[in-house]
Image: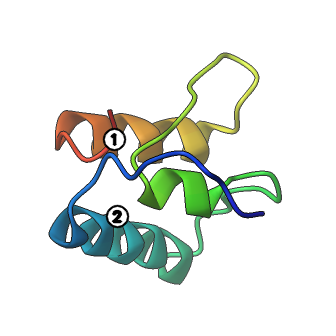
Amino acid sequence: MKYNAPNLTTKDEAKKIVNTVRDYKRQGKYLGELLDEEALVKGYAIHNAGMLPEQKELIEKLFQQKLVK
């Protein structure tokens, strides 16, 4: 899906997000079918009780690193 929203991340931040998601997948952590990686790389994320534990963990980690806004 293509978003018309502006990037909230720098190229370096976007690269860190991509690498973090890749690391999670390599570790065998299931991030679900609905994780919107394109929005995540742009710095957008949601966090709610209905998410998979691994998704919440990922979002929290990226937020702590100030990679998602």
Residue at left offset 20%, top offset 35%: 64
Residue picked out by circle 2: 17
Q: Amino acid at mark 1?
A: Val
Q: Is residue 66 left or right of residue 63?
A: left
Q: Position of residue 1 (x, y in %)?
A: 78, 63
Residue picked out by circle 1: 68
Q: CA distance from mark 2 to mark 1?
A: 9 Å
Q: Amino acid at mark 2?
A: Ile
Render colour scheme: rainbow
Q: Is residue 13 left or right of residue 25?
A: left
Residue at left offset 32%, top offset 45%: 8
Q: Secondary structure at mark 2?
A: helix
Residue at left offset 17%, top offset 44%: 65
Q: Front-most of 7 and 37?
A: 7
Quarter-of-image position of residue 69: top left
Q: Front-most of 2 and 61?
A: 2
Q: Front-most of 45 and 58?
A: 45
Quarter-of-image position of residue 17: bottom left
